Image (tube, grey):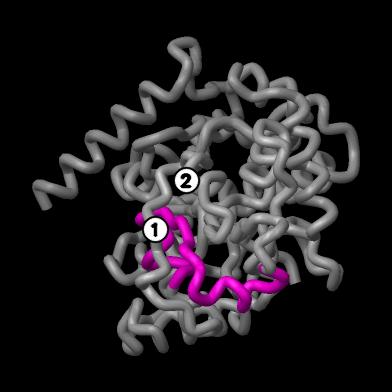
Amino acid sequence: MQALRLIVAVAVAALACACSPKEEVAKTPGLTPIRFATDWRAQAEQGGFYEALANGEYARRGLAVTILQGGPGVNVPQLLAAGSVDLGMGSNSFIVMNLAQERVPVKAVAAIFQKDPQVLIAHPDAGVETLADLKGHPILLGDASITAFWVWLKAKYGFTDDQVRKYTFNNGPFLADKRAAQQGYLTSEPYTLEKQAGLKPEVFLLADNGYPGYANMILAPDALIASNPAAVKAFVEASAKGWKDYLNGDPRPADALILKDNPDMTQDVLDQARAKLKSYAIVESRDGGAIGAMTDARWKTFIDMATSQGVYPKTLDGRAAYTLRFLGK
């Protein structure tokens, strides 16, 4: 417990450093203040939340929302568990299941990304035409990926751990080895490689090859769900409207806030990321489902995959990781 408290303290300090000194929790008479922590610095992958804030969707539903951008060293689930923020972003389904396994009283209440944007990237002239072709190739992976989507890749394609190479979020090793593949995010590394190295890589979206995980989930502590379910529902509904507007309407209000929060971001990166979120149906599924939707069946598919590979015990109650209470029918 002492170690956990230390980790939480470090995460809280990191969040404080990641936020601007002028950034304060919104306080407006008659509105419920909500501190929403994102999982990384402001970017298009958070655009719908910023759009809802810029267009007043949260305020119209009785909320005074402050978006606290994340960054290196910021652990959103720990901040939620410590009560340092009210709501937060869950990057992928493994994070939510880890919370359930550790009996942390935090749940996913909506999944903004119906497809996890995780990709594997290969050189265009390496004879790699499908994910299966990467068997035997060196694959650069971050530490967190080894116990996440790598589990699925091994189960489906027979990949082996001796293929793994350390990925330090530097494209250099990948560029130096034409046989190598590396992990990436659909809206990030492929564009960076093309822009900075003049390389148009082969990009394989895991979700389009059967990977069942959700991403960019809204996480809520059980305490808030119990004490103010109306605020949770209002946040989910306003965020869904914000995402619809960001993808299909005028993204400039959100982009202005993103560029203000993250001066290192550029408009061209925002534009290409938003275009990919649309063209790959990351947020708005092609089956017409509502933004933020989750289903028991989809979660069961993910949980069965993870437990069958020994990531979680078969006795783990996956329903403890999420709730469908705040989603429309």
Q: Confirm or deny contact between disc 1 and disc 2 (CB under 8 A).
A: yes
Marks 1/2: CA–CA distance: 10 Å
Mark 1: amino acid: Arg
Dot 2: few (<14), some (14–19), or many (≥20) neighbours within 10 Å? some
Answer whether residue 280 is magenta in the image. Answer: no
Classify the position of the C terminus by image quarter: bottom right
Of the residues shown, which amino acid type is indicated by label 2? Answer: Pro
Q: Is residue 11 left or right of residue 51?
A: left
Above or below, 203 relative to 159? above
Magenta-tinted stretch: 128-150
Secondary structure, mark 2, is helix
Q: Which residue is mark 1?
A: 165
Q: Quadrant of residue 58?
A: top right
**In this orientation, does residue 59 appear?**
no
Q: Name the residue: 34% across, 83% down.
A: 310
Please indicate whether residue 99 sits to the left or right of residue 61 in the image: left
- In the image, 186 versus 18, the foreground residue is 186
Label 1 vs 2, first from the N-terminus: 1
Query: How far across and down, in percent of the image, does residue 278 sit?
Result: 82, 51
Q: At 37% from the left edge and 24% from the top edge, which residue is drawn?
A: 16
Give 152 or 233, whichever is nearer the viewer: 152
Lateral position of residue 93 relative to residue 120, left or right: left
Instruction: Report crowding for label 1: few under 14, some 14 to 19, many 20 or more residues within 10 A (C-alpha).
Output: some
Near-viewer residue (316 or 203): 203
x, y percent for residue 167 = 42, 50
Secondary structure of the residue carrying tag 1 is strand
Residue 28 picture quarter: top right
Which quadrant would residue 313 be assigned to in this image? Answer: bottom left
Q: Is residue 138 magenta?
A: yes
Residue 175 image position (x, y, % from top left)? 56, 45
Task: Give residue 173's mark.
Answer: 2
